[in-house]
Amino acid sequence: SLTVLLWNSNGLTNRRQELEILLHDKRIDLALITETHFTDRSRFFIPGYTLYRTNHPDGTGHGGTAILVRNSLSHFFIPYNSTSFLQTTVISLLSEPFSYTFASVYCPPNHTIQQNDFLSYLSSLGPRFICGGDYNAKHPSWGSRVANPRGRILHNILHQNSYFCLSPSQPTYWPTSPRKRPDLLDFFICSNITSLYSDVYTLDDLSSDHSPVILTLDIHPKQTPLRPSLINGIVDWDLFRNTLDQKLNLNVPLKTPQQLDDNVEYFTASIQQSIWQSTQQTSHNKTTLLSYNLPLHLRQLITSKRRARALWHRTRYPSHKRLFNQLTRKLTKELHKYYNDQYSAYTQSLTTEDNSLWTATKKILKYRQTSHPLRRTDDSWAKSDTERAQCLADHLSSVFIPHPDVQDLQHTENICKELDISLPLSLPPKPFTPKDVINIINNLPKKKSPGYDLITANILSQLSRKAIVFITTLYNSILRTTYFPILWKFSSIRMIVKPNKPTHLPSSYRPISLLPILGKIFEKLLLLRLQSEIAPLNIVPEHQFGFRSCHSTVHQIHRVVDTIATSLELKQYCPGVFLDISQAFDRVWHMGLLYKLKSILSPTFYLILKSYLSDRFFQVIQGSSSSLIHPVLAGVPQGSILSPLLYTIFTADLPTHPNTIIFTFADDTAILSPHLDPVMATHALQSHLHILERWLRQWKIKLNELKSKHIVFTLNRKTLPPLYFNSIIIPMVNHVRYLGLHLDKRLTWNPHTRLKRIDCNLRYKMLKRLLDNRSKLTLTNKKKLYIALLAPIWTYGIELFGTAKQSNLNRLQSLQSKILRTVVNAPFYVSNHTIHSDLNIPFISQLARSRYTKFHSKLNCHHNSLIQNMSTRTLPKNPRRRLKRRWPRDHLDV
């Protein structure tokens, strides 16, 4: 059966604890809540339930609706544009044999609602729905004392259509004023409900002026399926190894691509079958939830409050109302004390030894993504998991192709001719050994999600010697046949919404590709061979710091800061452009990449990579549903360890200009053009952009002109001419974000420190319950939380912005002092210096000095000449210091 709760909470935040008790005691599957009084800043969570909410359109804390759904039920959210006179939250619950739409509705009493408004809303819910809420509509047909105009309108709609009403036999609204009489305002409107049994009644629980209503239906909702896994119980690993050895035959032919594909499939199936035969199956049936284990005195207090409310409902005496209010306040106070004690005991048990502390903080900081419908290109909605998976797959299939509007036909023709030229003969590379394979398997991360075959690193670590030899034979046959098995090129993609992006657009989701782990092992082995072959060629330019060992983002930003600081000291203009490459990794042109690989790699590795990039396919997984299979026609493979190297080779010949300075970190590209003459500086930068236009067009790379930024670093007030790319003006800004740091046009670090304080303060509010005096964590663990989760937000890049004006640094220093005072629960008369000394945490200025000194000491011995040039104790070109400003190297003189 299905149990539904309908309740007008009249403000839900302060009634969370008693609602949580009722949900678990009554085994509520679905809770329709009205008058939540939520705003965009409200946070609400009940364990075991998913919350969908609709706030009032004006953004203030009144009205609003919400639905709480048990996590084990299969459902999806349906969007609806609420108005000031009708707020609603709608979901679809999957059940057998039909699916039903459930809606929570609140209609404020001070608005006029026409019949067409009600009719259009109810018709939008579909053929089968249950719509419960506070309509503020009265009519004797559903149990009200009298009829009001809204009730007559709603009654006419029910009478004219195939809708019916389910309502309790008692009033649901109990006004506090003795001049008002109780009435029935909360009820359900239903359509085509096939339940053979239904029961509606009110409860005396909870403490709103509306009684909660319980609806029980003979409906069997579908359960959320478990995530697929090969291991569903206890595995006998000795039996697994013996079973697998019996299945494997080392004398198999591996001379053709078809034989290689067949043996890869044979080996994968052998592992899967051996795991199933070696696993002691365990039941996955979820046990019935037990009642909340509350102390006896709280249970008695809840019972007393329930009886007092029932007594007041019967008599309406003021004395009984006072008794009910007293018990309500006492229960609220006792529940608050009980939950605080429980939380204190919980925090006291958290430690870093068993990782329970980090597990708790991960739950607090984890972004809880709720299922949201997606808008298709024809403006229809993809609601179910199957529809959403197909919608996302259709979007990705339009992404994994070369840019259709960026091409150079003559250059493309030349590339095709070069690729058609036959390759010279070459000796096969040195074969892999079982020891090489074992080393890779032992270093695989054990918690990575598997590909479509569900084989994990934990399973591979239990393979026998015979199985390792078989895998090694497969890998060596790839070197011999130069064919990459097609089963290892199939990826299962799961989509994750990007932060602060609209959840109804497919473009707001980032694909996470899951490849078979057997193919990943070969990629790691191949990468080692490719790196040893490419390293002597010095293909990667020195200005490219991405995907390279001993190169960090701080190194690259240091180059940018040095260039800007030198131009400011020399009274130069330093216009810069920060380019945004559109879908840089997803739309890499395969023919262009193969052309560049052919010119630098041996024929064997080139043919392997050619096979590796061709005939790739993907499938989007959404919940328990999957999309159709689509081909991948462009891009470096998602989730592959080879992708960074392939992208670096593809963009290695990025053109430069003698009068500009270029900075690249993967696809993040910045170009600066310092000069005394603003016209010459802009001209040089524009000339470089013209060269980039031709190069990007040749290699089918598209620049997003509107997301790129143009900024002029200078202390002068003169306005420089705009920059153009493809005849489109690049937007000019006063500060820009590059590699995580915010650079303003005067390099004061004012925007950066301001924004980092906001980010750090937001996370501090989320973790405050673990850091303040309500938490029983030890002081050592609180300090670890601050160092591991809060400090990294603002300490990143402190080597560079640590010389900012003291007023800017004080923003971060004051927040750090505030947090540390909370951690130690220090009284007002204890100085910040004492707190920092006792905790052994340096002040920001001290930390910046020590971090930069350590950072600078390692620059001189770096193999990249651009980084070596930063090892001097003065700015580049050693300009005369005319500004009363401090730059990063000034830390060395203290």
Image: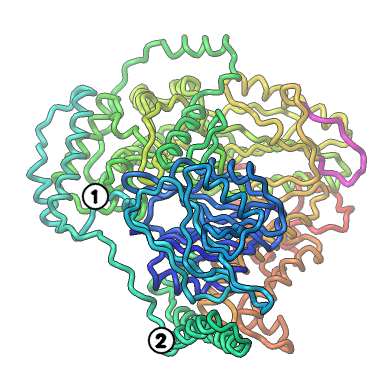
Position in image of residue 505 (x %, y %): 56, 39
Q: Would you place residue 726 above or below residue 850 in this image?
A: above
Give me the disc on residue 295.
2
Give the residue type that dot 1 points to: Leu
**Helix or strand or loop: what does disc 2 sit on?**
loop
Left or right, residue 673 beside residue 316: right
Which-is-in-front pick, marks 2 and 1?
2
Magenta region, mostly helix, strand or loop?
A: loop
Position in image of residue 474 (x %, y %): 22, 34
Question: Label 1 crowding class (10 Å Cα cut-off): few <14, some 14-19, many 20+?
Answer: some
Q: Nearer the viewer, residue 216 or 776?
A: 216
Q: Residue furthest left?
A: 246
Name the N-terminal-most of marks 2 and 1: 1
Give the residue type that dot 2 points to: Pro
Q: Nearer the viewer, residue 216 or 797?
A: 216
Q: Would you place residue 561 above or below residue 784 in this image?
A: above
**The residue stretch that appears in magenta:** 712-724
Left or right, residue 553 beside residue 537: right
Q: Quadrant of residue 877?
A: top right
Q: Is residue 511 magenta?
A: no
**Which residue is at a point 53% across and 42% down the rendered structure image?**
160
Q: Which residue is mark 1?
A: 230
**Which residue is at a point 70% across and 70% down the rendered structure image?**
815
- Marks 2/1: CA–CA distance: 42 Å
Q: Is residue 714 magenta?
A: yes
> Which quarter of the figure is the N terminus placed in?
bottom left
